[in-house]
Image (cartoon, rainbow, N blue to C red):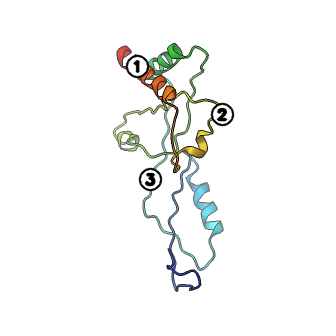
Amino acid sequence: MAGYQTDVFPGRASARVDGRFPPGHEQELVDTIDALLLPSVSREWVNHDIAMETTFDGPLVDALCAAVCAEDPDVHPVPYCNPGGTDAKAFTKLDIRCFGSKGLKLPHDLGYGRLFHGVDERVPLEGLRFGVRVLTRLRHSC
């Protein structure tokens, strides 16, 4: 934020960057940002959080995979890196493992990546129904 007029240069400007990094790559992100800054520009943390990961195994993972496969026998569940913040960061400090799931079955041509958190974010109703069926199976098996 630097001002409200396009033809006036303020004496000071600020910007916020929401940087996400996979576990083990924080320093790479910091080094990249620092390399892009001019010598007259300073950087400070507004919020500094952790990146987390856990292994993709255990009874809950087995139950989730079974629920997904029961609804779609052709699927191959795999772990993925969720770029969003979660409550799992708080639970990690208590040594509690957490798992997220995007319980949707989306058409290959949807282009969900460009819709994610966009102005026109949406999913097909059948994709949402699939997720409800999976979660219902998971709830009954646990």
Q: CA distance from mark 3 to mark 1?
A: 31 Å
Image location (x, y in percent) of residue 102: 49, 32
Give the residue number, with chain letter if any, for mark 1. Answer: 138
| Mark 1 or 2, closer to the camera | 2
Q: Which mark is residue 111?
A: none
Q: Give percent across and percent down for residue 76.
A: 60, 21
Q: CA distance from mark 1 to mark 2?
A: 28 Å
Quadrant that contains the C terminus: top left
Write the residue at 48% across / 68% down: 44
Q: Residue at x 58, y 50 (%)?
A: 25
Q: What secondary structure is found at the residue carrying circle 3?
A: loop
Q: Amino acid at mark 3?
A: Asp
* Residue under label 3: 49
x, y percent for residue 123: 51, 35
Q: Earlier in the sequence, mark 2 or mark 3?
A: 3
Earlier sequence position, callout 1 versus callout 2: 2
Mark 2 → mark 3, Cα distance in angstroms = 35 Å
Q: Which residue is mark 2?
A: 109
Residue at image x 60%, y 42%? Answer: 113
* N-term mark: 3 or 1: 3
Badge 1 local density, few (<14 within 10 Å), some, or many (20+)? Answer: some
Residue 83, compared with residue 126, is above or below; it is below
Going by the numbered disc 1, the residue's amino acid type is Leu
Observer-nearest of 72 and 4: 4
- Tell me the mark number nearer the camera, choosing from 3 and 1: 1
| Mark 2: amino acid | Asp
Q: Residues within 10 Å of mark 2 (few under 14, many from 20)?
A: few
